[in-house]
Image: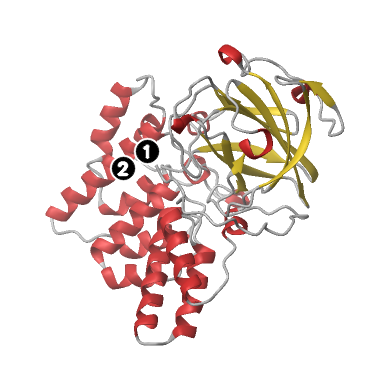
Amino acid sequence: MKSWAAAVGLPLFFASCQAPDGAPPAKASPLAGPIGSLRAVDAEGRGNEQAAAAWETLSKAGMEALPELLGAMDGANELAANWLRAAVDAVVEREGRAGRALPVAALEAFLKETRHDPRARRLAFELIQRADAPKADALIAGMADDPSVELRRDAVGRLLSNAQSQQKVGRTAEAAAEFETALRSARDLDQINSAAMQLRQLGKSVDLSRHFGFLTHWKVAGPFDNTERKGFASVYPPEQEIQLAAKYPGKTGQASWVELVAADEYGKVNINDAFGPLKEATAYAYSEFVTDKARPCELRLACKNAWKVWVNSKLVFGRDEYHRGTRIDHYRLPAQLERGRNTILVKLCQNEQKETWTVEWEFQLRVCDATGTAILAADRLPTPAPKPTTRKPETK
């Protein structure tokens, strides 16, 4: 029989009651029951009454309970994590008013365990910062490659600031080295652009397309019909089988596969470059991705048109929406890469609208891990020379 802890998915360090090597069972935490009640709450409102009662108990815990409360956020859903964060806040406020100090050493140990939930680790860092700002500053200096994107952002911000200080006093070589380190570690668009701009001003080359992991070499087929927006649900031949030498009945005559290279450094693949500015049309973009090992990944897509994405012939996701705005990494699609050759197919539909702002028929897609770190294909081709552009990447 599963324990209650296993049933609600508590981390193993809460669920375990059996000590190793036949030693007597460890004493269960008195907070395990209330923590389990909080973690059982769901978005449909089930478990709210029990969670409220559990929160009352947890909010009366002492400062020494903070690592346990933070650890309970591992694997918790968003609602449960909010309950737990509120419990942490309540403990800190009540115990602080009573003059009790935050357990900085225990919080530091928790922070350094990168397996913990990024939200919990960020909260642990903020508590350390409240209690001992110099220690927090020293800790963040070593987090430029942290799996928590929020903590990494603070560390990269520090690198950028240091580089700018070096630049102001004429130490350009040192500044360039700091900017290069910042760029390698940066995962947020504003910091990436800031580091890239500074490096270019210092005469350094920057390959943003490679940094992001954008796929730049595609085969595209089309145009197929999308009259009355029926193309999204229609199954055209490329969805059934990829035959790059094949020719198909298309919207305006014969449809076939043609090469399309994205020379935009932010990975924009412009379907209009292949077929012209068509309306009520559907196209497919196909690319292959070779990797030396099987691994989970994220496909991060931006597209203003209706779209679907397949990986290795399996539909990952799709959106039947048009011209609602987009930005880099607008959609994050978990996927699985297999060892060797992987296939990626994107379906893109243009609707009937004629306004100038509806002409764009393009997408950008990159392969990365959950932190946004690029996963590069083993056979990645050189990045195409970027075309001159005055358009900035969209962030909203």
Specify whether 384 is left or right of 387. Answer: right
CA neighbours of label 2 inside 10 A, class few (<14), some (14 to 19), many (20+): some
CA neighbours of label 1 inside 10 A, class few (<14), some (14 to 19), many (20+): many
**Quarter in which the N terminus is drawn:** top right
- Comparing 117 with 291, the one in front is 291
Say which residue appears at 35% left-offset and 40% top-offset. Answer: 31
Classify mark 2: helix, strand or loop: helix
- In the rendered image, is residue 1 in sight? no
* Residue 350 coordinates in the image, percent (x, y): 57, 25
Identify the amino acid type marked 1: Ala
Specify whether 139 is left or right of 292. Answer: left
Say which residue appears at 51% left-offset and 63% top-offset. Answer: 185
Q: Which residue is mark 2?
A: 85
- Comparing 249 with 38, the one in front is 249
Say which residue appears at 26% left-offset and 45% top-offset. Answer: 61
Say which residue appears at 36% left-offset and 59% top-offset. Answer: 107
Task: Please determine whether, in this image, residue 75 is positioned above or below residue 196.
Answer: above
Q: Which residue is mark 1?
A: 81
Identify the amino acid type marked 2: Arg
Looking at the rendering, which quadrant does residue 188 occupy?
bottom left
Task: Please determine whether, in this image, residue 88 is positioned above or below residue 57.
Answer: below
Residue at the outermost right position: 245
Specify whether 171 is left or right of 211. Answer: left
Specify whether 381 is left or right of 39. Answer: right
- In the rendered image, is residue 222 in sight? yes
* Residue 51 coordinates in the image, percent (x, y): 31, 28
Residue at the outermost bottom position: 170
Circle 1/circle 2 CB separation < 8 Å: yes
Classify mark 1: helix, strand or loop: helix
Disc 1/disc 2 C-alpha distance (Å): 6 Å
